[in-house]
Amino acid sequence: MEIKRRKTRQVRVGDVRVGGGAGVSIQSMVKAESADVKAVVSQIKALESCGCEIVRVAVKTFDDADAIRLIKKRTNIPLVADIHFDYRLAIRSIAGGADKIRLNPGNIRSRGEIAQVIRAAKSSRIPIRIGVNSGSVMSRSQAADRRPQTDNRKPITENRKPTMAGHLVDAALGYVKLFEDLEFRDIIISLKSSDVASTVEAYRRIAAKCDYPLHLGVTASGPYDSGIVKSSMGIGALLLDGIGDTIRVSLTASPIEEVIAAKRILSALGIRRSGPEIISCPTCGRCQVNLMKIVSELEKRLYAIRYTLYANRFATIALMGCEVNGPGEASAADIGIAFGKSTGMLFKKGKIVKRVKAKDAVRELIRNL
Ligand code: SF4
């Protein structure tokens, strides 16, 4: 199925184009303190080598802002400064060479301060992300929820998700209006909630109301396993709608895992292939080899090589536990093995290549990729 992408304006973040028909870019955020240049540079280099295309750093002090100049000199991918509360940190980050600024409408609200940031962004020709989070619009939402019980209107608690989505959209559009009044349109918007349904609803609504590119993410999605599920559902649903121009998977885990998860989401939707995809059966009583062990070993081997040797090469690798569906699935994949008892038939592009021992399966697959 071909996904029809939403038409948007295009902005440039360093040399990465976002929106306007550009591919969906992958971003992550450094988890070290920005003033610790050595640690930040090391993390950015690791992120870059595994496929991260835009990276964000938290700027909470002037030391962090001043570190941007040094970080930029030692790294290659576009650098985004994440700003909250103090507009002067944005201006200092721009002076240091930041490629994009993220502002939070929930905590930088003065028109005069925003105007100064916009002036600096314009003169450096960099975009600004209007990054709305549910946490920062929560106070207004909670105020609405606390309406007196005697109020005859429908209780907001019956309709909490659309209400949160509405707050996110209103906050973003209010900020957008301010930017447009100041004749600034190099804007990217994000509307993140830790609630998947609210996030999806908010993005769908704003996608219908403006043509700015959208940065997708489910915020504070949680630890690795549940975070991957929430992010995949939220980001995946939107991408299938054709919504979304750049993505960040937020996990309470290494940022490398965020990038790998983002790549897997894009790959699963056929938006962007990155390295071989493993198709393997769940196994059942018919399986006579230790398929879980074989798949796990293959995954580890591919992990070690997928971002180097095979970074731009797509292959489906099928590992099937028996002859019921095995030969069909394995022969439909680029390469695969359908196992019998302690051996398997290795297929390549639909043709039987040879019989291999189960203990040699991973080595044979890698050798024949
Ligand atoms: S392919 Fe075979 S082993 Fe795997 S789940 Fe299906 S029937 Fe079971």
Image: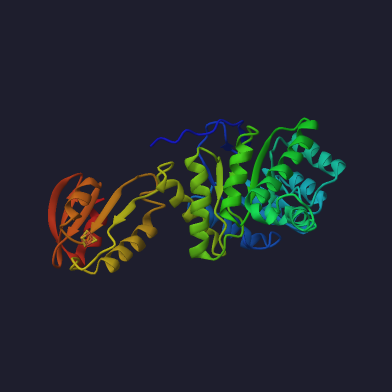
Where does residue 122 sit, x and y in percent of width and height? 75, 34
Where does residue 128 sit, x and y in percent of width and height? 70, 41
| Above or below, comparing residue 248 to residue 242 in the picture | below
Q: Quadrant of residue 354?
A: bottom left
Residue at image x 19%, y 49%? 328
Quadrant location, ligand no. 1? bottom left
Residue at image x 54%, y 33%? 6
Decide if residue 173 is on the left or right side of residue 250.
right
* Front position in the image: 231 or 68: 231
Q: Would residue 87 be seen by someone viewing this image from the given angle?
A: yes
Where does residue 75 sit, x and y in percent of width and height? 60, 50
| Above or below, comparing residue 121 to residue 135 in the picture | above
Q: Quadrant of residue 101?
A: top right
Decide if residue 135 is on the left or right side of residue 54.
right
Decide if residue 31 is on the left or right side of residue 185.
left
Total numbered circles:
0
* Front position in the image: 30 or 222: 222
Where does residue 35 sit, x and y in percent of width and height? 71, 60
Residue at image x 82%, y 47%? 109
| Above or below, comparing residue 186 to residue 53 in the picture | above
- The quadrant of the picture occupied by the N terminus is top left
Q: Quadrant of residue 289?
A: bottom left
Colour pattern of the rendering: rainbow
Q: Would residue 76 be seen by someone viewing this image from the given angle?
A: no
